[in-house]
Amino acid sequence: MKRRNFLIGLAAVGAGGGLLLGWASQRPDLTGDRKVFGMVPGETALNGWVRIAADGGVTIAVPRADVGQGITTALAAMVAEELDIDWAHVRVEQPSQATIYANATMLVEGTAMIPAAERGHWAEVVRQLAANGMRQIGLIATGGSTSVRDAWLPMRTAGAAARSLLVQAAAARWQVAEGECTTAGGQVLHAASGRHLGYGELAPVAAKLSLNAQPVLRSPAEWRVLGHDQPRLDLPGKVGGRTQYGIDVQVPKGLFAAVRMAPVFGGEVRRVAPDAALAKPGVTAVVTVPGGVAVVADQWWRARQAVLALDVDFTKPDMLPDTVRLRADYARLAGEGSAQTHETRGDQQAAREGTATRVFSTDYHLPFQAHAALEPVNCTARVADGGCEVWVGHQVPTLVRWFAAKVANVPVDRVVFHNLPLGGSFGRRLEIDMVVQAVTIAARTPGQAVKVVWARDTDLRNDAYRPMALVRQRVALDAEGLPVSWYTRVVTPSIMKSVLQRLLPLAASDLSPDKTAVDGAIELPYAVANLRVEHVPAPPGLAVGFWRSVGHSINAFAIESMVNELAEAAGQDALTYRLRLLAGHPRHQAVLQAAAKAAGWNTPLPPGHGRGLALHASFGSIAACVIEVSGTASQLRVERITAAVDCGSALQPANVRAQMESGLLFGLGSALYGQITVVNGAVQQANFNDFPALRLADTPPVEVLIIDNPQAPIGGIGEVGVPPVAPALAAAIHAAAGGERLRSLPIQPISV
């Protein structure tokens, strides 16, 4: 055992891994007891993921939230492939809250236990043991572009196991060897005799059997469903207007609630005079909720008008955040703040004093960012008869049930949760505030369902924002212009601490390192002998949380912008310079070259045009983009975006392309306009006029190339397109207009 891998394992145990290792001593049951998927009349469950109807229709458990990312189709396709059924026979269903549906990958990757790039036997052993332990915890969640990666083994195994049981049942009936049987299109076939039996007929018998052997998974060369585009299962309902989101919920005789939050962060209701509101038509109650007050009425608009008219006195915290003051604080902390070291190699001091001929020291600034999902925050709840019922689109069903039970003061098993499709999230619906508010209000109106809907200004001004950040870098170059040392100091609030303060206050601590703060700055693929990455936990000022691509969106801007500056200083082309630094990383090089070639990187441009390039690996995938612009930063036109991605095997190519396009355009809108500013504790932005989304008229042509790589591990895709956009855009503007490099976002801030 190498010393490095031994220390990795030791660190895992020291970070709480001892508990995980104890849990993981038993092999986890990936397929689950068939009873957990429900006993439905006319259908037979073969395990916790698969039910088969008498007519051969197959219902597949999909325990991840539909945020428009196509996850319903992607996960169902894994089972369909291994089960060997026609796509037309597939149905999906949200399963119960069983531990087999836990997202272990999301939890393991969110810790600093083991670097994602660390390979070798012992690193993989510790990583697998940690994942097994996380499955025992049973937290069902969607996030971190982990849904496909986490389900890759369990759902394929479930499909293959179900198929094996069906083959066993058919072979027993025909009294032939199982090896003589094959499957196709939902049937078991015996070629020698020409006999065949449908899955629907075999399922009741198969359910009583035990597997004779570990099921064998299909190789990519055998795939008929995976790797090929299938019609998305969620689209007919959305196109036809039948899909019901949280904001669409209508419970008979239900009430509506509008919320008015404290005007500054940290404020609470000190005094409220309810009589004027209660006198208005349709108003039934005034309820104090965490951070604000709600009015309940028979119509939402009546509730909204009444809550705005309430006479309310709010408290104010002693220290009110202000973004101008916070930016100055971050600059001070960049020089003298106490830091946590996340990665170090080589000798920074020796590199600077030895071969270095030039040193670059540069700060990059990024603002607070709101999620601004098109479906505003909402939740419907009913408390009655010792139980609680909740309707909401949410990324963490386990938390919904825990918090609903706590607020309603009922047992967790008395909480009925309807998880609905989400009209956007980008991390916002990892938070639990909407559930706490809805259940708090419903408890005051027992027996009646209450739907809470936030107005847009309430949504924007009471978010859990992507944190503001200052990334300071100091890079020393040798005589050839190549980096010999790279020092990165990220000054930003700890997202993990902020989230834990809201969810599990006793676990929130400044002592625990927050990997999300340095994602994208650690594990650089570029050849640098001496490297150090630090995080200075800054005071947040606001509530901060997970935002599409999280720390990668912060650090990619700084790292890739610095690479572009270094290439210019070395008198080298940005593509050539990167390829030289990526020796030994053929996947990165292939992605970079594919994007550059498709964009015509070396072809001349008209006067006033410029191209910029960036590369970034995140969530197990590698993406590069080239952006072409014309004009200046103040009068800018984005002409074209060309991108390439390697996410391992592209299981649903059309959806991989769609998610990349989505991420690229999300990143473009954020880089151009997105920022949240705070003055004396109050967020200044209120709607899409001062926090714009990218409009169709401003959307450039987008081309995405997929590099299919079956030998590589499966990577995520929902967030991968976001990080490289901002640095590529800044480089393109510099190439088009010259002048100073853009080191602060957004590029075109909206005055408020």
Image (tube, rainbow, N blue to C red):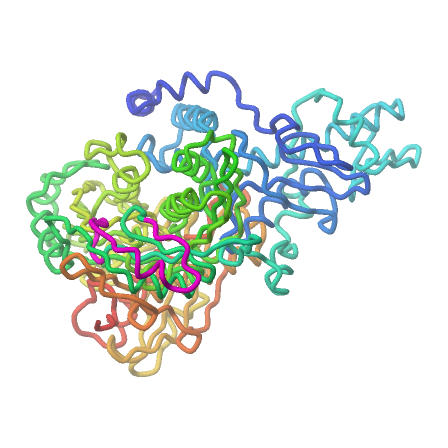
| Rendered position, 535 above or below 746 | above
Residue 546 shown in magenta: no
Location of residue 193 by image quarter: top right
Location of residue 100 by image quarter: top right
Q: Left or right? Give the position of 586 relative to 198.
A: left
| Rendered position, 207 above or below 256 | above
Res 672 visible = yes
- Expressed as whole percent of the image width and height from the top left, the position of residue 287 reads 34, 49
- Expressed as whole percent of the image width and height from the top left, the position of residue 168 reads 78, 25
- From the viewer's side, name the closer residue of 485 and 262: 262
- Expressed as whole percent of the image width and height from the top left, the position of residue 591 reads 43, 55
- Expressed as whole percent of the image width and height from the top left, the position of residue 658 reads 51, 60
Q: Residue at x 79, y 29 (%)?
A: 204
Q: Residue at x 37, y 19 (%)?
A: 19
Res 596 visible = no
Which residues fall within the magenta stretch? 263-287
Residue 277 shown in magenta: yes
Q: Classify the position of the N terminus by image quarter.
A: top left
- From the viewer's side, name the closer residue of 127 and 564: 127
- From the viewer's side, name the closer residue of 48 and 681: 681
| Rendered position, 505 above or below 720 | above
